[in-house]
Image (spheres, rainbow, N blue to C red):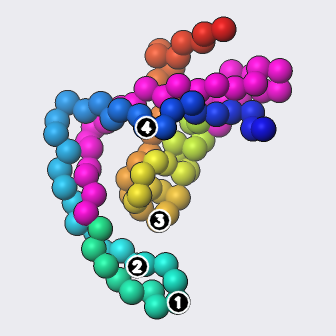
């Protein structure tokens, strides 16, 4: 079992403006490498509240926050995120919003 989990199947994206639809050229996986179009919503700005559970016997809250900050900078979230050579999806932890529930 992992040390950190997100006990949610879907999370709400909060944004003051409606998303705009983007059309991106994508290369499909497989031997053919065929290109196609992907239609994706773009949210700017956006925020999300993410419930996180972690095993406090093996990892501390500061470490969880550090992992999330690192992931937000170097991995991101969504289809065209930094980890996938994209330019979207980076995030940072809002330290003022952290609540710990026992």
Q: Residue furthest top?
A: 102
Which label number is shown at residue 31?
A: 1
Please name which of the two marks, 3 or 2, marks the residue nearer to the observer: 2
Mark 1 neighbour class, 10 Å CA radius: few under 14, some 14 to 19, many 20 or more = few
* Residue 41 as seen in the image, left or right of residue 2: left
Q: CA distance from mark 4 to mark 3?
A: 24 Å
Judging by the rendered image, the residue that carries numbered circle 3 is 85
Residue 73, position in %: x, y? 52, 45
Q: Earlier in the sequence, mark 4 or mark 3?
A: 4
Q: Secondary structure at mark 3?
A: loop
Q: CA distance from mark 1 to mark 3?
A: 20 Å
Which label number is shown at residue 102?
A: none
Judging by the rendered image, the residue that carries numbered circle 4 is 10
Residue 16, position in %: x, y? 20, 30
Q: Secondary structure at mark 4?
A: loop
Q: Is residue 2 above or below residue 78?
A: above
Q: Secondary structure at mark 2?
A: strand
Q: Residue at x 48, y 37 (%)?
A: 9
Q: Quadrant of the image for the C terminus?
A: top right
For residue 61, what is the image quadrant?
A: top right
Q: Is residue 78 above or below residue 95?
A: below
Q: Residue at x 27, y 44 (%)?
A: 43
Magenta stretch encompasses residue 40:
yes
Q: Magenta residues, as a range?
A: 39-67
Please name which of the two marks, 2 or 4, marks the residue nearer to the observer: 4
Q: CA distance from mark 2 to mark 1?
A: 11 Å
For residue 17, what is the image quadrant?
A: top left
Judging by the rendered image, the residue that carries numbered circle 2 is 27
């Amino acid at each position: 079992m992992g040390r950190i989990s997100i006990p949610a199947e879907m999370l709400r994206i909060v944004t003051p403006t409606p998303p705009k639809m983007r059309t991106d050229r994508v290369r499909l996986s497989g031997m053919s490498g065929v290109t196609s179009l992907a239609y994706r919503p773009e949210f700017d700005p956006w925020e999300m509240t993410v419930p996180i559970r972690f095993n406090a016997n093996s990892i501390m809250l500061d470490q969880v926050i550090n992992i999330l900050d690192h992931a937000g900078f170097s991995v991101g979230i969504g289809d065209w995120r930094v980890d996938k050579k994209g330019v979207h999806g980076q995030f940072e932890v809002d330290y003022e919003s952290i609540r710990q529930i026992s």
